[in-house]
């Protein structure tokens, strides 16, 4: 005899959302609900309680998210075991048709769903509601011919006439939209409302007055500045080369009366670079310098020095001197070791596998057990379980591919070794631990430090309900 499923009383803000969904039946909705506030529970209630007889499609953005969603709907609260089917790469084509004909609730990835629509759209006639998980992932960060990622331009045409409910942890970022040779920096919400016309928005601000504040888990951000004179010197030279190259680009545009293409905005230069009517040499040099600066901030010296051997850079750097004087162990790795020793459970995020390996080796040599997750890891679940349950496993190091779709609420400290400019992406990284302390590593006196401080200001202004910035401690962070 199976164990009874746990009873769950909706929180006040969840009841508010579910009531609004019922009131707005048939009206497209976009729901912003922050990380950890129960988007899956809302999905379960809509499917099992609010509309228990209606055919419903649940669209998730990845195969791993599909597996987690199916397991949750079947296992957490129950009631859907017989109703639930899926459309994914792990389901054979014949069984996909069976699911569409026999199951009331279908969980699907966009690609497989689009393929099934193209084969026989009549199979979807009885599905009236479409729940889109992480609806913000429909939007391209920098659009080309369309502002939406594949296959959503096609899929949305198939979904016309159905009731769309899109949910996301945040709808507060912007993206670049190209029109001919022009560029527009637009709110992603504006784009979503364009492609889901008439959508009513329910934001985090609408939830104030309920009990939502009782369940928000605050995240504290701080910058951990690292003094490294060699890295600072290299970055200053690269900054100057980037500024000079950008000035050359602006001059070339001005000479041909094309300056209005970028409207004086350096971000537009980067986003429009491939489309700008400038020489290929300038394009390659500018993008190469930006990437090189990123490598200097994010990689061990042995790896990033390989990129310094081009003829252009040899005029500005003595490669032999750099090889002799730069330490093999990155200063950021040394800082990770110091912080990990001072905390019970530490999660480390870094962009490159070379840093994953170096951090693991250095920490293990210092006596700290280390687990790693990257895109090459197959047993992510077992590794996360070990990190969560084994007190001896004190550090988990992850690459961006490895961290996708994973939540680690049991880490005392998150260390972010390198940051990107996309506000929402960084915010979503910070929230993986569901609160606690996040230390952003930055080389003192460099453009990286300035970038991170700008990033923190943007995050604080966009997500004031769950983010606080504490004074940077530099070398003394504990």
Image: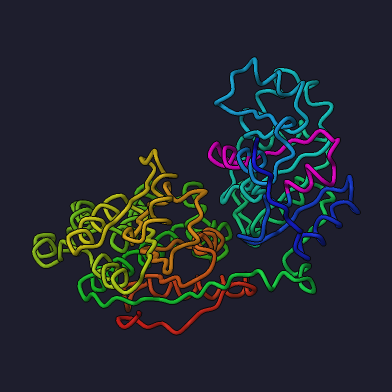
Residue 296: image quadrant is bottom left
Q: Note whether 455 is above or below 56 in the view shown.
A: below
Residue 334: image quadrant is bottom left
**Going by the picture, which residue comes out furthest to the front?**
1
Q: Nearer the viewer, residue 68 or 289?
A: 68
The stretch in magenta equals: 43-69
Report the number of discs: 0
Q: Note whether 242 is above or below 100 in the view shown.
A: below
Is residue 56 rendered magenta in the image?
yes
What residue is drawn where x is 76% and y is 72%? Answer: 208
* The C terminus, quarter of image: bottom left
* The N terminus, quarter of image: top right
Q: Nearer the viewer, residue 142 or 429?
A: 429
User: Is residue 270 visible in the rendered structure shown here?
Assistant: yes
| Left or right, residue 324 beside residue 443 | left
What residue is drawn where x is 67% and y is 35%? Answer: 107
Is residue 15 rendered magenta in the image?
no
What residue is drawn where x is 78% and y is 30%? Answer: 104
Q: Nearer the viewer, residue 382 or 34?
A: 382
What residue is drawn where x is 40% and y is 64%? Answer: 416
- Residue 174 point in image, percent of width and height: 62, 59
Q: Nearer the viewer, residue 375 or 451?
A: 375
| Left or right, residue 290 beside residue 99 | left
- Residue 110 point in image, percent of width and height: 64, 34
User: Is residue 312 visible in the rendered structure shown here?
Assistant: no
**Going by the picture, which residue comes out furthest to the top?**
94
């Amino acid at each position: 005899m199976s164990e009874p499923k746990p009873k769950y009383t909706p929180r006040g803000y969840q009841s508010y959302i579910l009531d609004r969904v019922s009131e707005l039946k048939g009206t497209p909705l976009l729901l912003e609900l922050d990380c950890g506030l129960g988007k899956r529970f809302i999905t379960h209630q809509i499917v099992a309680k609010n509309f228990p007889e209606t055919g419903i499609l649940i669209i998730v953005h990845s195969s791993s998210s599909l597996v987690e969603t199916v397991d949750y709907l079947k296992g957490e609260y129950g009631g859907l075991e017989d109703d639930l089917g899926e459309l994914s790469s792990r389901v054979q084509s014949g069984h996909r048709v069976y699911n569409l004909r026999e199951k009331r609730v279908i969980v699907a990835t966009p690609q497989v769903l689009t393929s099934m629509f193209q084969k026989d759209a009549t199979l979807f006639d009885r599905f009236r509601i479409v729940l889109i998980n992480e609806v913000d992932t429909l939007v391209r960060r920098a659009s080309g011919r369309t502002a939406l990622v594949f296959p959503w331009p096609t899929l949305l045409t198939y979904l016309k006439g159905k009731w769309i409910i899109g949910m996301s942890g945040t709808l507060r970022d912007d993206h670049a939209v190209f029109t001919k040779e022009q560029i527009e920096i637009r709110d992603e919400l504006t784009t979503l409302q364009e492609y889901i016309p008439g959508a009513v928005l329910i934001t985090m601000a609408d939830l104030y007055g309920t009990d939502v504040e009782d369940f928000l888990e605050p995240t504290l951000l701080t910058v951990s500045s690292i003094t490294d004179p060699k890295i600072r010197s290299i970055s200053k030279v690269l900054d100057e080369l980037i500024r000079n190259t950008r000035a050359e680009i602006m001059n070339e545009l001005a000479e041909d009366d094309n300056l209005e293409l970028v409207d004086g905005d350096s971000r537009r230069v980067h986003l429009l670079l491939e489309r700008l009517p400038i020489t290929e040499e300038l394009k390659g040099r500018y993008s190469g310098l930006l990437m090189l600066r990123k490598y200097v901030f994010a990689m061990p010296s042995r790896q990033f020095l390989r990129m310094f051997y081009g003829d252009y850079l040899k005029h500005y750097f003595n490669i032999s001197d750099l090889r002799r004087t730069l330490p093999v162990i990155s200063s950021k790795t040394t800082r990770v070791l110091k912080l990990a020793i001072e905390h019970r459970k530490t999660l480390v995020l870094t962009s490159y596998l070379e840093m994953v390996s170096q951090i693991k080796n250095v920490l293990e040599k210092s006596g700290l057990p280390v687990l790693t997750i990257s895109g090459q890891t197959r047993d992510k679940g077992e590794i996360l379980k070990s990190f969560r349950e084994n007190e001896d496993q004190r550090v988990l190091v992850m690459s961006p591919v490895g961290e996708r779709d994973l939540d680690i609420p049991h880490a005392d400290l998150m260390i972010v070794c390198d940051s990107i400019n996309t506000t929402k992406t960084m915010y979503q990284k910070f929230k993986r631990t569901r609160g606690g302390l996040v230390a952003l590593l930055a080389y003192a006196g460099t453009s990286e430090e300035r970038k991170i401080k700008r990033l923190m200001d943007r995050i604080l202004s966009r997500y004031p309900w769950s983010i606080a910035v504490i004074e940077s401690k530099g070398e003394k962070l504990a």
